[in-house]
Image (spheres, helix red, strand yellow):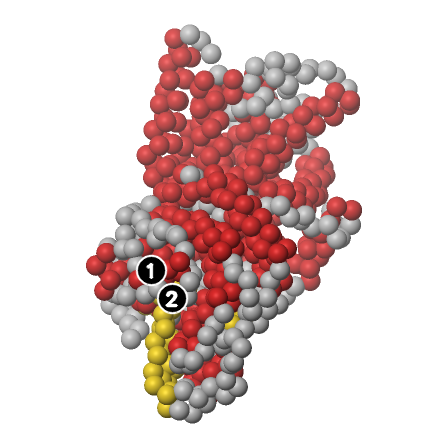
Amino acid sequence: MQIESPNILLIVVAAVVMVLYVFTNSAVLVWVERKVSAHIQRRPGPFEVGPFGLLQTAIDGLKLMAKQLIIPGKADKRLFMLAPVLSFVPPIAALLTVPFGKVVQVQNLDIGILFILSLAALNVLAILIAGWASANKYSLFGAVRSVAQNIAYEIPLLLSLLTAVLWMGTLNLGELVDAQGGFWFVFTPFGFVAFLIYFVTGMAETNRAPFDLPEAESELTAGFHTEYSGMGFGLFFLGEYTNMILVSAIATSLFLGGYNLPFVTLNGEGVLWELIRVLIFLAKAYFLIFVMIWMRWTFPRVRFDQLLNLCWKVLIPFSLVNLAAAAIWIKAVGG
Amino acid sequence: MIQKPDPTQETLVLNMGPQHPSTHGVLRVVLHCDGEYVLDAEPVIGYGHRMHELIGEVRDHRGFYANVGRMDYGGALSFGHGHILAVERMLPDLEVPERAEYLRVITTELNRVASHLLWFGAFLLDLGAFTPILYSFDDREAILDLLEHVTGARLTFSYMRVGGVCADVDKDWCDGVLAFVKRMRDRIPMYHKLVSGNIIFRKRVEDVGLITRDMALKYGCTGPVIRGSGIPYDVRRSEPYSIYPELDFDIPTSERCDCMGRYDVRWAEIEQSLRIIEQAIAKLPEGPVMAEKVPKVIKAKGEVYQAVEAARGSLGYYIACDGSTSPYRMKIRVPSYSNLSILKELTRGILLSDLVAVMGSFDLVIPEIDR
């Protein structure tokens, strides 16, 4: 294998583009979430600022930036400031390897999926630091919950992704998409089970209802970000929405055939074909996000021990059996 | 007595409230936690104390009436009903027109449905579901519009007067109420579909906060809390007042004893209230809504105790008078106070999330407890 020297300029430009994308994505997603939840709840949602209230999130962001960042007296200042950054930067870095199209991918790593997972795992560190540094009991409860549930849901999450990796025989995200082509992994029984497990644990990964236990508003006021104000809170918020897109992007690449249509592989050359591929990829990812929003505004929150029970007693055994079955199938029939 | 934290014990003292989303107002609960487990929960009340009983002893009977609706913002009309009935009992010559009594019951039952809808939304909010409250507020809004039309208020109603009610209703209003009853009946299956059958919801409330019959009796629980433990105690039937003996309705109970039992009871009560409203509208007699001769100054002697069934349970007014224009002693027995007192025993050793569910299932109204 030949080691290429990474193109520094490309990465810098791409990182800036990615940060811009993340900000726009969050702004739009907040708007979408508010609109979708409003329609679920029979209200109009934001409509005053800009057409259809589109500028509402921009104004809200401005408000957050203008707000004073209050640091509690007994808080550990450095850690307190570090936590929001730590929850916001890794998902952006992880997005650099996501194959939005054949060409539109900043860096195609051979260990792409591993890279993403290791960065995604930093999220729990951010929550732990935030909960610890706030010097607030509710924050601490949130941090403890986050760590405990992290161990529980990351294992089935990894096992379900491992099934996909085993089936296609690569960790490279671009190759994973190409290996599926038109025949998405989710069409196979193993892929289907793995996808369901991945999606449930992915919801837990993003800390969203019904698994939003670290912030469980009605129990822990706001959990780990109780003490955060202004942009400190804003960065956690951005991190959450970036995580959502990351989780859906992984699901799209590994289970839903990436930028390919069902049973149709898009191999055309040129800008137009690439644009179509990117749009297809984003459509799938945003559809998954829509499902997440839909679930959040429909279900009550699960109890802490129920999530642990679900993960340890149901999801882990199922994903293990699924992985073993997939392995046997590959050995016996050939993948 | 609040326990002092013991530094030798590895437990955490968590101060839940008085500003906490799930304490429904200014209730403070001091928790001793071992991790997520609650070892001891001590409710601390009094943050919303407004001396209502003392004000009742200073003002005359009519002057105090405006205060009672402020105690229970969820079901102000039942609180008013109890007070007015108590005052009227001190005036044996007063004859309250039948129409007025029917109107009192119709508005009170509408208010009960509104109160239960408010509880339903808040309970689900406690369990982390945000959407149901907006659905239930949609229906509650319809009730408030109806009540606003006749009482002029939307929350702290002062509709009743000694000797009757302050405003009469017309046929359009009655039709509006019947239309609402029909609409609400159509909506109930939707609520059950959205919430009652949801697996996450059922896992959160089933076998959580078990109140045995003995416990419920020992602590003097009333309302849906005691009926959720299988005891069919309802003041409307056990100490009949107003026109309730003439109406046909059931006392729903549940043998489950848990949060789900209390949830089921409240939904069944909404259906029974709709039945009562329908019957009362059908039977609504013609005539005046105020008694002809109401004494301008109420000077009474002796003591009365009048209990009514408020949305949260048995509500009692004890008024002792010494012949002057204001009561010598006013004591108000509120349901939430007794219902809350069970919290300490009930929540020993349960999870923090369950504590929130249990408190939600009590339907606490803090101003009513603090008075």
Q: Is residue A175 above or below residue A31?
A: above
Of residue A44 and residue A125, the one placed in the foreground of this image is A44
Amino acid type, mark 2: Tyr
Residue A214 is tagged as none
Q: Viewer-proximal residue, B353 or A122?
A: B353
Q: Position of residue A312 (x, y in %)?
A: 34, 36
Quarter of image, res B310: bottom left
Element class at badge 1: helix
Note whether residue B83 is visible.
no
Along the viewing direction, whichever of A91 and B137 lies nearer the viewer: B137
Residue at left 58%, top 48%?
A: B179
Q: Quadrant of residue A112?
A: top right
Q: Point out the residue furthest to the top here.
A: A333
Identify the chain of the residue marked 1, using the numbered disc in the image: B
Q: Position of residue B312 (x, y in %)?
A: 40, 62
Mark 1: give few (<14), some (14-19) or many (20+) Cα within 10 Å: some
- The residue sitting at 49% across, 32% down in the picture is A199
State which quarter of the image contains the N terminus of chain B: bottom left
Residue under label 1, please give it. B237
Q: Which residue is mark 2?
A: B241
Is A41 left, or right, of B203 in this rendering? right
Q: Is residue B41 above or below residue A86?
A: below
Labels 1 and 2 in the same subunit: yes
Q: Residue at x 75, y 46 (%)?
A: A52
The quarter of the rendered structure image containing the C terminus of chain B is bottom left
Q: Is residue A239 above or below residue B315?
A: above
Number of marks in picture: 2
- Could you tell me which chain the residue with mark 2 belongs to? B
Compared across the picture, whether B26 is left or right of A228 comes to left
Res. A316 in view? yes
